[in-house]
Amino acid sequence: MNRKQLFILLALVVVLGVLGLVVHQRNQSAWQGAGRKGSAGKLLGELPVNDVASIMIKGGTNQLDLVRKDNLWRVKQRNDYPANFSEISGLLLKAADLKAAQSEEIGPSHLGRYKLLPPGPGTNTAVLVELRDEAGKVIRSLLLGKTHMRKSEGRPSPMGEMGESEGWPDGRYVMVGTSAKTVAVVSDPLSNIEAKPEQWLNKDFFKVEKIRSVAVTYPLATNSWKVTRDTENATDWKLADAKADEKLDSSKTSSFSYALSSPSFNDVLPADTKPEEVGLDKPTVITLDTFDNFTYAIKLGQKTNDSLPMTLSVTAQIPQERTPGKDEKPEDKDKLDKEFKDNQKKLQDKLSQEQAYGKRIYLVSNWTVDSLLKERGQLLTEKKEEPKKEEKAAATNDKDAADLMEPPKP
């Protein structure tokens, strides 16, 4: 190949490259141009957030209804249990601010490609979100389709091989209304919007503080136990009714001081669930007394997979009057009286709030109560078994034989 032919070949390569770039940019500009048209305003227009009184989310054959009653959001599929307001407000704020990063006109035959088919038992269906007013009229509706993935080239995969990874979610294909012809991509995967009632529950729960004693009562009485401590800051626990040969293993009781200090739950069972249906007719009972004179009685039923059904009963003996200190000065009385009243109100509010949890059966994770669910013998130090008489005799004979076989020392 001479120099002239080489220059001609290079020129052709450049021309082909330019043409390819032009075509690519034309396609991109067509997509992005539509996107700019869609993103000029908000997808749902000026959404009247304060008028939304209920939210319906439907995915597949599952439906979730979040309803505002008595100025409190509730989960209908959980017998109107209080909903997580921060999750609901987050959903509404996102919906009000949704904008299209890209958009494209499509026909009905392409809806499945974007997983935007109406919700139902089939495949490639969308998640339908309807925002309704107090009369149940739909204010806005939105179909959530396939997750948009951002791919990353040249990064190692989890298996250690180089190449193109699957990427990560950076958006979602959506469609306003149920009969629209425009699919848009928004820059939020909206992955937490699902028709799962347990996901939307208010997971605030009781909190045990300043534990004074812990007792676990099993259906089999010999496994039951109770431990106590003298002061709030004490780390050593004492076994009640301990036998002469029973000694607590401190490594197994070290977590008792802060047990159930911040528990949570996974779900609530239907309000008409009968105790015998979940093993609560023959429960294991955990009783915790605190230095604030609160008593928590927790009943646990039959374990299913990684969850336990649980009921809660809370009582308290809150002092109504303050006992003056022995060396209390008159000038300190007002201050101490105020502190007493403030603390009294705090304890009363805590009691009222926690007693409300006694109306339902909760499902809690095993790990929530695992540290307390130990049988009596599991809390004790291991006993070292004394060798039997026969073993002692055999060991003595072996030693004597070894001494005979030893050569005399020079």
Image: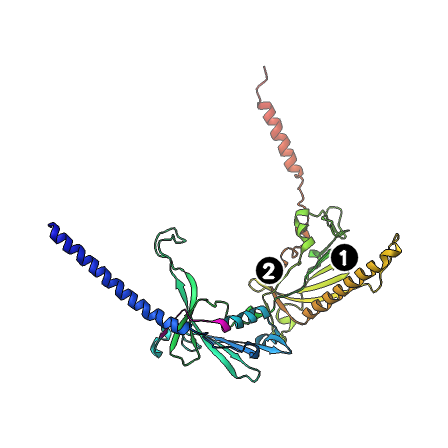
Mark closer to the chain start, 2 or 1 = 1
Residue 84: tell me if it is visible. Answer: no
Mark whose residue sits in front, 2 or 1: 1
Name the residue: 34% across, 54% down: 163
Q: Position of residue 364 (x, y in %)?
A: 61, 64
Q: Give me the residue at 60% from left, 23% from top.
A: 404
Which kind of residue does numbered mark 1 sit on? Answer: Phe
Provide residue 309's location: percent of width, then percent of height.
62, 66
From the image, tell me which residue sits under label 2: 366
For the C terminus, give its image quadrant.
top right
> Could you tell me residue 230's position as x and y percent?
77, 51
Res 159 seen here: yes
State yes or no: discs 2 and 1 in contact (Cβ < 8 Å): no
Q: What colour scheme does the image use? A: rainbow
189 or 61: which is nearer to us? 189
Q: Is residue 161 left or right of residue 142?
A: left
83 vs 10, left or right, is right
Residue 98: numbered disc: none
Residue 372: x percent and y percent?
66, 56
Residue pushed farthest top?
Answer: 410
Residue pointed to by mark 1: 291
In three-dimensional space, the C-alpha distance between marks 2 and 1, rounded to whole angstroms, equals 27 Å
First to last magenta residue range = 95-104
Helix, strand or loop at mark 1:
loop
Amino acid found under the numbered disc labelled 2: Asn
